[in-house]
Amino acid sequence: MKNNNEILEALLEESIKIFPEHYARIEEKARTLYLEFSNREEGKPKEITMHTVRQIYPCIAFYKAVIDQTGQQETAYNIIDGYFKKRAGASAKFLQKILKIPFVYNIVPNIMTVVIRKIFGRKSGFEMTEHKTEGKVCHIDMLICPYYSACSACGCAELTVAFCNSDDVAYGNLHPKLSWERRKTLGRGDDCCDFILRVK
């Protein structure tokens, strides 16, 4: 597999500004690690690699490369956290425009349930419990998450929180009639990640 990736390129571009004197070594290390991690996924279904190869491993590779070359773990985390918050913010703005259409907010919980089943289902390496609820509510508990599993396996479970944070940005302020409730995440040491989006 190639050792470049859209996310990795964006993170490396940000690191030039912060670590100009270390950049060459960070880049070399990150690309090497990314290739190593990605090769492990060779032959796996696209439902899995769309998470591991495209999103998880570029972040782990960058994170470990920065720490290895600079020792600055917090800065490495903040770069990744900032990237995903910015991307989630752009997604939220797009959704907010759509939700200005009268009463469209009513179908968002149902749509979210369908999307989670499709993109974050068992075929993609996730395990979840769906709660039967009254009214217009999406309530899903994610019990196994490849983002947490991969970060933990690579010795950087704390990095999972950066992925969790982006959910809060993406769904936290979609519409005045929608509430986003997140009480637990695997990345913060809880027994699951809960996704609760309801019409108020």
Image (spheres, rainbow, N blue to C red):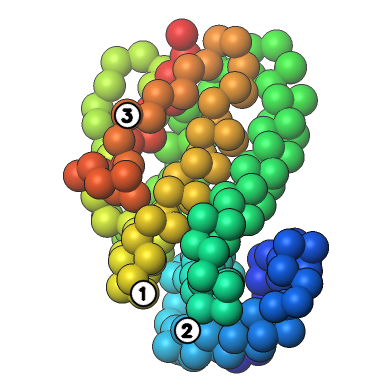
Location of mark 3 (residue): 183
Separation of residues labelled 1 and 3 (CA atoms): 26 Å
Residue 135 image-quadrant placement? top left
Q: Kindly check if marks 1 and 3 are in contact, taking CB atoms under 8 A apart as contact.
A: no
Q: Which mark is residue 21?
A: none
Disc 1 element: loop
| Residue 58 in sight in this render | no
Residue 65, position in %: x, y? 55, 77
Compared with 17, 154 (above or below) is: below
Q: What residue is at 74 percent from the left and 34 percent from the top? A: 94
Q: Name the foreground residue: 59 vs 29.
A: 29
Label 1 neighbour load within 10 Å: few <14, some 14-19, many 20+: some
Location of mark 1 (residue): 154
Q: What residue is at 51 percent from the left and 33 percent from the top? A: 168
Location of mark 2 (residue): 37
N-terminal of the pair, mark 2 or mark 3, is 2
Q: Amino acid at mark 3?
A: Arg
N-terminal of the pair, mark 1 or mark 3, is 1
N-terminal of the pair, mark 1 or mark 2, is 2
Disc 3 element: loop
Q: What residue is at 67 percent from the left and 85 percent from the top? A: 25
Residue 79 image-quadrant placement? bottom right
Separation of residues labelled 1 and 2 (CA atoms): 10 Å
- Seen from this angle, which residue lies furthest left? 191
Q: Amino acid at mark 2?
A: Phe
Q: Kindly check if marks 2 and 3 are in contact, taking CB atoms under 8 A apart as contact.
A: no
User: Which image quarter holds the N terminus?
Assistant: bottom right
Residue 59, position in %: x, y? 55, 67
| Residue 117 in sight in this render | yes
Disc 2 element: helix
Q: Amino acid at mark 1?
A: Cys
